[in-house]
Amino acid sequence: MHVPDGFLDAPTSIGAAVVAASGVALALRGARRELDDRTAPLAGLVALFIFSTQMLNFPIAAGTSGHLLGGALAAVLVGPCTATLSITVVLLVQATLMADGGITALGTNITLMGLVGVWTGWLVFIALRRVLPKRPLWVVPAAAVAALVSVPTAALAFSLLFDVGGTVDVPFATVATTMVGIHTLIGIGEAVITALAVLSIVVVRPDLVHGARPSLERRTLTIREGVSA
Amino acid sequence: MGAGHGHHLHFHGHSPVHHLPAHLKLLALVGFVLTVVLTPRTAFAAYAVYLLLVLVAQRASRVPFGYFAKRMVVEVPFVLFALLMPFVATGPRVDVGPLRLSEHGLVGGFALLAKGTLGVMASLVLATTTEPRHVVAGLERLRLPGQLVQIMGFMVRYLEVVTGELSRMKVARESRGFRATSVRAWPVLATTAGALFIRSYERGERVHLAMLSRGYTGSLPVTHPATATPAQWRVAGMLPAAALATLLVVVTR
C-alpha cells in the first residue's frame, strides 16, 4: 500500500523527499560499483521484475490474496544500491503512470520502501550471512529473516512519520501497534515467498544472486573423474 | 507475443491536454496537488472547487469517464484507512446515528479522503493523456538524474515484454491444471517469480551487450528535446493557478 497525497503534512513530505533524494544520490554512486556500466539496462529490468512480481497474487485463504513487496528480495538478488534505484523507479512509474501513491508523497514512499525496506533487509541479511555457514544455500534462510524484519520496520518508520506529520490526531501507540501488527503478518508471508523465490534461483543460477557471491568465491574448481552422466 | 502493442496505461487521443508537453503536465500536477495538500482541512468549499477543476481538466482530455473511473480503484485500500479514522482518533466525540465518533477523526478522515482522491484524479489526468515514454522525457527535462531517467526508460520500454512473459507463464501454469487457491500454491508461484528474475536479468545482459555493440558509452542521446511555447505554459498553468487562487480566497477570508 502506497502513501497517497495529503496523508502527511507538507513539511514532513518535503523532509522525507530530501531524505529520499540524498539516499537515491548515494545509491546512484554505489550502484556503479555493483553493476558498472550495465547499471541502466539491468536496473531497469530488475525494476520491471519487481513491478511484475507485485502483480503476481498469492492466495491466502477465503478468496483473499496478497502480493510481494520485494524490498529484501531485491537487495539479496542485486545488491542494496541497485535495489534502492529499482524500487525508486518502480514507485516513480506507479505514481506518474498509475496514480498509485501520491506525487507529493513520492519522497515518503521512496524513503519507506526504497531506503528503510531495502537497507533494513540488507543489514539483517549481511549480519546473518556472517554467522551462517558459507554455502550458497544458506542465503535462503538469511533472505527469509531479512524479509520478515524489513516489512514491519518499514511500517514502524511510517508510524513515526505519521506521528511527526500526520494530519489526523491518532495516538502514536495505536498507529504503531496496528501498523506493525498487520505488517508482521504480511512480513511472514513475504519471508516465505522471498525464501521460495531465492531458493528457486540459487539452485539454478547461484551466480546471479548478489548476496551469494562471497560464498561462491570460496568455491574452488574441482576436477572429478568417473562422473556418470 | 502474438498480441498487438496495446496502450494499457494511457488513452490515445488528440485533445489539448494530450498535446501539452509532458514536463508542463508534470509541473501542473505537482503545483495543483501541493495546493490541495496545503489547504486547511475544514475548507470544504475549496475542496468542491478543486473537484470541479479536476473534472474540467478530465473532460477537456476527452478520455471517457468510465475508463477514468475504473483506473481510480488503486485508491481503494487507502479509502478503507480513511474510513477507519473517526473510530480511532482522539478528542471530543459526537453522536452520528448509533455510533460515537471522534470529531477530529471525522474531519481528518474527510480531509484524507478529499486530498487523496483529488491527488489520484489529478495524477490520472496525466497518466491517461501521456504516453509513458513522454513522461520519461518530461522527467528528463525536469532534471531527474540521467541514470534514473535511463533506468525508467528501460523499465517503460520493456514493460509489455516482461508483463507479457509473466502472462504467458500464467497460461502455461493453467494449461497444466494449476489453480492458485491456497497457500499450497506458493512454491509454484515463487518459482514463477524466480524464473522471471532469471529471464529478466538475462534479458538485461543481452540488452546491454546489444547496446555496447551499437556504441553505447553510458549515456543515451536526446533526439527530441522537449520544448514548450508560451501558450502551452499558459494552458498548463491554468489548473494550478485556479487552485492557488481558490486557496488564497479561502485563507484570507
Image (cartoon, coloured by chain):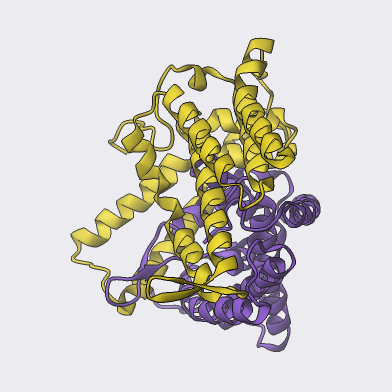
Residue at the image point whose x is 61% and y is 35% from the top: B29
The residue closer to the viewer here, B76 or B169, is B76
Against B169, residue B25 (above or below) is: above
Q: Position of residue B133 (x, y in %)?
A: 54, 30
Q: Quadrant of the N terminus of chain B?
A: top left
The residue closer to the viewer here, B238 or A185, is B238
The residue closer to the viewer here, B1 or A21, is A21
Q: Position of residue A4 (x, y in %)?
A: 57, 54
Q: Position of residue B39 (x, y in %)?
A: 66, 46
Is residue B243 shown to the viewer in this render?
yes
Residue at the image point whose x is 54% and y is 53% from the top: B201
Left or right: where B32 falls relative to B98 = right
The hue of chain A in the figure is purple
Q: Quadrant of the C terminus of chain B?
A: top right
Left or right: where A186 falls relative to B28 = left
Q: Position of residue B195 (x, y in %)?
A: 43, 61
The residue closer to the viewer here, B237 or A139, is B237
Left or right: where A203 falls relative to A9 = left
Against A5, residue B9 (above or below) is: above
The number of numbered badges drawn on the structure is 0
Is residue A216 shown to the viewer in this render?
no
* Chain colored yellow: B
Residue at the image point whose x is 69% and y is 67% from the top: A116
